[in-house]
C-alpha cells in the first residue's frame, strides 16, 4: 500500500499467499490522502501537532501502520485485525511498544481525551452506535472526526448516527467508490449523547430446540441482536445434548447460546467458547452467567483465531456456525480454516458439527478433510453436517 505516509507491505491475518483479498481498500487510501492534503473545502490535518489520534475499526491495521509515526491508539473488535496490525507493524519495522502504538479492544476503556478520531465504518450499525456513544465523553469541541468507508457501506442511517451522537455531519464526493464522513463535534450534542443502549437481552422461545427458555445477552455487533437467528435455531434442534462430560467447543460462539445449551443439558460437559470478536466472547460469557447456576463446571472463554490456540487432539465435540463474510466480501476462507483447525484439535473419534446455508457446499470440504461427512438435518435453506475424526488417525494413517 503506497500512501503519503509511506509504502508498506500489508497482509491479512493469518497471512495466506493464496488469499486474493487485500489488507486495505480505497476507503483507507482516501482517508490517508485527505489527512495529508485535504479534501474539497477541508484542509489537511496537522497530525504532528494534533494530540491523541484514535483509529476505530481499522480492519487489518492499514491505517494504524501508515500513521504509526503519530503514536495512534487503535480500537478494534477483532482479534484477527489486532494480530494483523501487530504483524504489519513488525513487518514495517515499527513494533507495538506503547510509546509507538496503543492497541485497545472494544472492551477496553478508550483514551481519556481524543483529539483526532478516525472511524472505519463497520458493517454493523449497532456496533457503530455503541462505539460512538462510548467515545463521545472523550471528544471535545476541537476534535477532528473523519469517517471512511466504501459507498455501499455508508447509508443515511450511518450519517444520522454520527450527527445524533457527535454533531453536524456531511460527506465528501465519492472517489473509487469510497467516501469520507466529516463530523463537527457539538458540545451540546456530545453532552446529550447518553450511554450505549447495549447489551440487549431476550429469552429463546419454545421453538428454540435445546436453547428454549435460555436468556441470551447480545453486546453490540453480534448477529441478530434481539432474536435467535434462523440458522442457530435450526442448529439447536439438532445438536447432541447427551455429551457425557465431553470437552465441547462452541466455535465462532457469537452470543454463546449453543455452548450454553450444551452446558445446561449436561452439567458435566467442559465447554469452551471461542470467537475472534471481543464483543462476541463478552456476550457468550454474559449469556452463560445468566443461565448457569454458580457451582457448575466453569466454562472457558477465548478470543482468537478459531481453535488454533487449543492443543492438538484435546477436544471431543466442536459445534460451528461459520461466517461466510469477511466484512463486505463473501468468502469461505474463514469456514475452511475453522474446519482444518477443528480436525487438528479433535481427538480421534471426535466430531465436528456444522450448520450452514445449503448453497455453501461445505459437505465437499468436510469429505476432503475428514474422509467422511453426513447430513444430520436439512431444510430448504440450511443443513446440519457431521464429520468424524477417524480412529485410524491415532496410528498416523
Image (spheres, grey):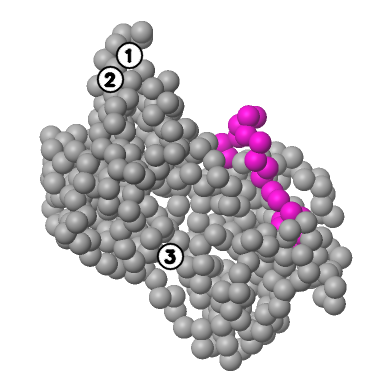
Q: Nearer the viewer, residue 183 or 379?
A: 379
Task: Say if 104 sits above or below 83 in the image.
Answer: below
Mark identifier at residue 220? 3
- Residue indicated by mark 1: 393
Task: Say if 268 sits above or below 61 in the image.
Answer: above
As drawn, is 245 to the left or to the right of 40? left
Mark 3: give few (<14), some (14-19) or many (20+) Cα within 10 Å: many
Judge whether residue 344 can be spotted in this image. no
Q: Is there CB contact under 8 Å for labels 1 and 2?
A: yes
Q: Residue at (54%, 41%) from the top-left corner?
A: 331
| Separation of marks 3 and 2 at Cα, in angstroms | 38 Å
Q: Residue furthest front?
A: 380
- Residue indicated by mark 2: 348
Nearer the N terminus, badge 1 or badge 3? 3
Magenta residue span: 13-32
Q: Residue at (24%, 55%) from the top-left corner?
A: 288
How far from the left and from the top, in percent, is residue 360? Answer: 45, 37
Residue 14 within the segment the image draws in magenta: yes
**Residue 308 occupies which quadrant of the picture?**
top left
Assign the N terminus to one quadrant of the image: top right
Assign the C terminus to one quadrant of the image: top left
Amino acid at each position: 500500500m503506497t500512501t503519503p505516509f509511506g509504502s508498506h507491505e500489508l497482509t491479512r491475518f493469518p497471512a495466506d499467499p493464496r488469499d486474493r483479498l487485500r489488507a486495505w481498500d480505497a476507503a483507507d487510501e482516501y482517508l490517508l490522502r485527505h489527512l495529508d492534503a485535504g479534501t474539497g473545502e477541508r484542509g489537511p490535518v496537522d497530525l504532528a501537532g494534533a494530540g491523541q489520534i484514535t483509529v476505530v475499526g481499522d480492519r487489518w491495521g492499514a491505517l494504524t501502520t501508515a500513521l504509526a509515526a503519530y503514536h495512534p491508539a487503535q480500537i478494534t473488535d477483532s482479534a484477527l485485525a489486532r494480530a494483523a496490525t501487530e504483524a504489519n507493524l513488525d513487518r514495517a519495522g515499527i513494533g507495538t511498544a506503547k510509546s509507538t502504538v496503543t492497541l485497545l479492544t472494544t472492551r477496553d476503556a478508550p483514551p481519556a481525551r481524543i483529539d483526532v478520531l478516525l472511524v472505519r465504518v463497520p458493517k454493523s450499525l449497532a456496533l457503530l452506535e455503541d462505539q460512538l456513544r462510548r467515545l463521545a465523553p472523550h471528544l471535545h469541541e476541537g476534535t477532528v472526526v473523519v469517517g471512511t468507508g466504501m459507498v455501499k457501506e455508508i447509508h443515511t442511517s450511518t450519517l444520522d448516527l454520527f450527527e445524533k451522537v457527535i454533531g453536524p455531519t456531511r460527506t465528501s464526493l465519492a472517489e473509487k467508490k469510497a467516501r469520507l464522513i466529516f463530523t463537527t463535534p457539538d458540545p451540546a450534542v456530545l453532552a446529550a449523547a447518553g450511554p450505549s443502549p447495549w447489551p440487549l437481552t431476550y429469552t429463546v422461545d419454545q421453538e428454540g430446540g435445546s436453547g428454549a427458555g435460555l436468556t441470551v445477552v447480545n453486546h453490540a455487533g453480534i448477529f441478530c441482536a434481539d432474536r435467535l437467528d434462523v440458522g442457530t435455531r435450526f442448529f439447536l434442534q439438532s445438536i447432541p445434548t447427551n455429551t457425557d462430560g465431553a470437552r465441547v467447543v462452541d466455535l465462532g460462539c457469537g452470543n454463546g447460546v449453543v455452548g450454553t445449551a450444551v452446558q445446561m443439558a449436561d452439567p458435566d460437559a467442559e465447554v469452551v467458547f471461542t470467537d475472534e470478536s471481543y464483543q462476541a466472547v463478552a456476550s457468550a460469557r454474559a449469556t452463560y452467567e445468566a443461565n448457569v447456576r454458580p457451582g457448575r463446571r466453569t466454562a472457558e472463554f477465548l478470543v482468537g483465531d478459531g481453535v488454533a490456540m487449543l492443543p492438538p487432539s484435546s477436544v471431543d465435540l466442536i459445534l460451528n456456525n461459520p461466517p461466510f463474510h469477511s466484512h463486505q466480501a463473501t468468502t469461505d476462507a474463514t469456514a475452511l480454516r475453522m474446519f482444518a483447525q477443528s480436525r487438528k484439535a479433535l481427538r480421534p473419534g471426535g466430531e465436528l458439527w456444522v450448520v450452514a446455508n445449503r448453497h455453501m457446499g461445505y459437505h465437499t470440504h468436510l469429505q476432503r478433510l475428514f474422509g467422511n461427512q453426513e447430513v444430520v438435518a436439512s431444510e430448504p435453506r440450511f443443513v446440519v453436517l457431521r464429520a468424524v475424526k477417524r480412529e485410524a488417525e491415532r496410528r498416523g494413517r
